[in-house]
Image: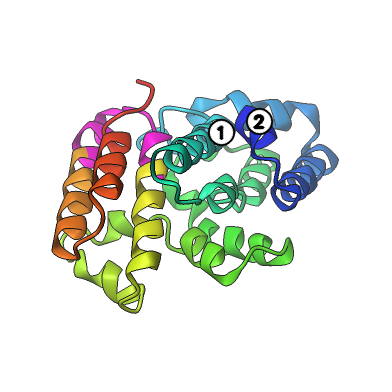
């Protein structure tokens, strides 16, 4: 993964090294290649890219965020979907592919647990655990601020995580509808809670950007 190599965080590198070893040991080279290349096995309604490529793009977006805002969500975003590896391997072993997003249910918590095991702090674990919360809160975005316990700094990092994740999803038919909704949610949350304009602008632009 190109972006992982640029991060230079040994915790992230070790976590993905362990994941890659798991893929090789349990599924072999064919599954490893599929994780990096097979778009149809990564809930294609919502993702234009393979699981590996999506993670790479999200990590790259986090590096963009760091350069634009000085706020670092790089390591948590590099591990945000590592919990999908076990699902991917299991379904391929059973002769299926992860074409339905529900097959990845619970990956956020699994990713957070892997982050804990590799020494990421509680704030990073929180960002990983709730990086997909925006999709569930489109009708009630204040739940996001409440989940952050009123902590604006934590809210900022979670908003930037939403943007990075959206950037990595690409532009499927479903995302052409959903990503503008996420951008609108981000814009309103930033304005309502007086977050820095650079956070709002960076997050909205990333959410509406990304490879098509």
Q: Give whichever of 146, 49 is nearer the camera.
A: 146
Q: Earlier in the sequence, mark 2 or mark 1?
A: 2
Residue closer to the observer: 99 or 8? 8
- Counting from the top left corner in percent of width and height, residue 104 is at 51, 51
- Percent across and percent down for residue 54 are 50, 34
Q: Which mark is residue 56?
A: 1
Name the side, left or right, on which 191 lies relative to 63: left
Q: Say if 209 sits above or below 58 in the image.
A: above
Q: What residue is rendered at 85% in x and 42% in y?
A: 25
**What label sits on residue 1 in the rendered view?**
2
Label 2 with label 1: CB-CB less than 8 Å: yes
Q: Which residues are magenta?
A: 165-179
Q: Residue 62: say if magenta.
A: no
Crowding at mark 1 (Cα within 10 Å: few <14, some 14-19, many 20+): many
Which x, y percent locates residue 88? Answer: 62, 43
Q: What residue lies at 46% left-to-right and 37% top-to-bottom? A: 67
Q: Main secondary structure of the magenta part?
A: helix
């Amino acid at each position: 993964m190109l972006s992982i190599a640029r991060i230079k965080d040994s915790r992230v590198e070790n976590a993905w090294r362990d994941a890659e070893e798991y893929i090789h040991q349990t599924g072999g080279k064919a599954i490893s290649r599929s994780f990096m290349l097979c778009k149809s096995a990564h809930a294609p309604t919502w993702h234009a890219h393979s699981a590996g490529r999506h993670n790479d793009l999200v990590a790259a977006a986090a590096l963009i965020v760091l350069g634009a805002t000085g706020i670092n969500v790089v390591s948590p975003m590099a591990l945000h979907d590592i919990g999908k590896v076990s699902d991917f391997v299991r379904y391929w072993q059973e002769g299926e592919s992860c074409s339905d997003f529900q097959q990845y249910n619970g990956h956020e918590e699994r990713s957070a647990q892997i982050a804990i095991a590799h020494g990421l702090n509680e704030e990073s674990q929180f960002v990983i655990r709730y990086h997909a919360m925006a999709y569930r809160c489109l009708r009630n975005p204040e739940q996001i601020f409440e989940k952050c316990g009123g902590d604006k700094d934590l809210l900022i990092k979670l908003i930037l995580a939403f943007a990075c994740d959206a950037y990595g999803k690409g532009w499927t038919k479903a995302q052409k509808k959903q990503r503008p909704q996420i951008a609108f949610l981000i814009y309103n949350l930033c304005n309502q809670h007086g977050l820095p304009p650079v956070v709002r602008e960076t997050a909205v632009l990333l959410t509406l950007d990304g490879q098509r």
